[in-house]
Each structure stands twice: as C-alpha cells, then as structure tokens.
Image (cartoon, grey):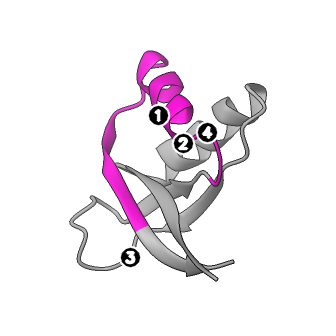
Amino acid sequence: MIVGKPLIMLSSITYAMKSRDILFKYGIRAYVERTPKGSNAGCGYSIYVPERTDEAEKILSRMGIRILGRLERNGRK
C-alpha cells in the first residue's frame, strides 16, 4: 500500500538530530533522513515523523527549531 511519508525539512543535520532527540522526549518517533532532491531544503536533511506530525511541528517551533517546510513523500508501507 502506498502512503504519504511526512517529512519536516530542517536547515542542517545538526538540527535534524536535535529535533529527533526533542521529539523522543515527548514520546514521538522521528527519524533523520536525506531530503529528496529538488525540494530546495538547505543542506538536505529532514526528519520523518510517521505519527503526530502536526504536534511534532508545533513542539519544534515552540522549542526554537526553524522549520523550512513540510513535504509528503510517497513511500511504501
């Protein structure tokens, strides 16, 4: 089954790892991934947040993490 894969785009690998760790403290799973080419997202790193993506984005903004955007990438489940 093909489903959307929500990616939160960030400015660097450092912010991607920091974001993953912050979300883990809130019980939200997040995985650092390369941003697909052609999305114009800085150095090209994002976090994949399979569930509670809207909540994750709000938490990161509240914690001062600058989010470059959000991308729904097709993936297989």
Instruction: Give the residue pinned by disc 4.
Output: 52
Secondary element at image label 4: loop
Which residue, given by chain and number where applicable, does mark 1 sit on? Answer: 57
**Residue position for label 2:** 53
Q: Position of residue 48 (x, y in %)?
A: 57, 57
| Earlier-in-chain disc, 2 versus 3 | 3
- Residue placed most toward the observer, 32 or 51: 51
Q: Which mark is residue 36?
A: 3
Type of amino acid at the residue the image marks with label 4: Arg
Who's the residue at 40% across and 63% down the image? 72
Q: Residue at x 34, y 33 (%)?
A: 66
Residue 6 in the figure: left or right of residue 29:
left
- Say few, some or many: other residues with alpha carbon within 10 Å of mark 3 (under 14 / 14 to 19 / 20 or more): some
Q: In front of the other: label 2 or label 3?
A: 2
- Magenta residue span: 50-72
Mark 3 / mark 4, whichever is N-terminal: 3
**Marks 2 & 1, CB-CB < 8 Å contact:** yes
Instruction: For marks 3 and 1, give the one nearer the viewer.
Output: 1
Image location (x, y in percent) of residue 56: 55, 34
| Amino acid type at image mark 3 | Pro
Rounded to the nearest angstrom, the CA distance separating label 3 from label 4 is: 21 Å
On the image, the x and y values in percent for residue 29 come to 73, 46
Pick the residue in front: 21 or 54: 54
Identify the disc placed on residue 45: none
Q: Position of residue 73 (x, y in %)?
A: 43, 71
Alpha carbon of mark 2 to alpha carbon of mark 1: how far? 6 Å
Regarding mark 2 in the picture, which secondary structure is present there? helix
Secondary structure found at label 1: helix
Disc 1 marks a residue whose amino acid type is Glu
Circles 4 and 2: CB atoms closer than 8 Å: yes
Quadrant of the rendering where the C terminus is positioned: bottom right
Could you tell whether 73 is left or right of 68 in the image? right
